[in-house]
Amino acid sequence: MLLQMRLAEENWKVLRSLFPAGWRQMAWYSGSLRRLRGFKSPDVLLRMLMLHVARGYSLRETVVRAKPANWTDISDVALLKRLRHSEEWLHFLCVALLRENVGHQFDAGINSRARVVDGTIVREPGKTGGQWRILYSIRLSSLECDFFEVTATIGEGSGESLCRLPVTQRELILADAGYCSVAGIEYICQKGADALVRVNPQSFVAYSVCGKRICLLSRLRSLSKVGRLGEWRVVPHGHGSEFAGRLCAVRKSDRAIQHAHRRLQRKASKKQMITRAGTLEFAKYVIVFTTRSSGSTADVLKTYRMRWQIL
């Protein structure tokens, strides 16, 4: 137990060194700590909030763990109140960390117009509880939610689609492979915006500008070395729609490829299925499609990495 506590303290010191400048002062300025009232410092409050939010401990379990560590002795209700008052503080930390670590990868114009889109399914508790699909987006420059919609999981208009998203001109919409549909991307283009989506190799059908069907796998195999970049001008087809864009890809590191293959094998084992050789080959690459014409291949892939801010 003593060794575990020492390791935890060392890990906390390392994590704390990564926080942006002024993070303690922001706790007071934002109202998260009007008075300490049971907390020795902003460090203790943030540490408890991270146990609850990042580690997934319940409020009750968090306060139980805090007592033997001699952090504080408060109730779970008191911690909940602190959490509610810490929204501005936590938001400040996220935005500051984003700007310090990866904000330099964008020019100011792209950063201010980029939006990250994702969705999830939530279930009501109990055997008879229903389930609902959530579609939401955040503004990348501020990490603030600018759209939120709840729908049923079955029926017309309930699937994952960019067509449900309100879009304005010159925006850049980032989304994962679940939103890689010709109809959704065309909808974004018709609104005067650009799309940047992860490619679903199983459903992505594209042709060259000359009208010849592209074999995606053969193009990707030309990226034989780790970190090798590739880009091809393509025209996706589907449901009578077609438009030009850029297909960009990079070969993953050997470690990332092994991790992706293990994940596929676990999924196949769970569903008692056989993983196809083509699926394993596609897993060696990060593949995205964008309608945005400016920026290098590396810039496009760096931009897509920002989508993970929504997770």
Image: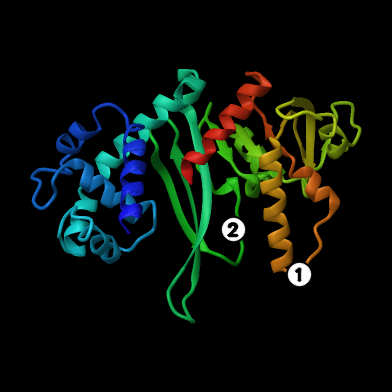
Q: Which mark is residue 39?
A: none
Residue appearing at x 23%, y 61% in the figure: 63
Tell me where residue 169 appears, x and y as whole percent: 52, 29
Q: Nearer the viewer, residue 165 or 140?
A: 140
Determine crowd level at label 2: few under 14, some 14-19, many 20+ residues with C-alpha closer than 10 A.
few
Query: What type is the residue that disc 2 sits on?
Result: Gly
Tell me where residue 299 appears, x and y as whole percent: 61, 22
Residue appearing at x 63%, y 29% in the figure: 301
Left or right of 44: which side holds 135? right
Q: What separation in Å lies between label 1 and label 2 (alpha carbons)? A: 31 Å
* Residue corresponding to mark 1: 272
Q: Nearer the viewer, residue 209 or 123?
A: 123
Q: Which mark is residue 157?
A: 2
Q: In the figure, 60 relative to 19: above or below?
A: below
- 1 or 2: mark nearer the eye: 1
Query: What type is the residue that disc 1 sits on?
Result: Gln
Residue appearing at x 70%, y 27% in the figure: 227
In which quadrant of the rendered view does residue 288 lie? top right
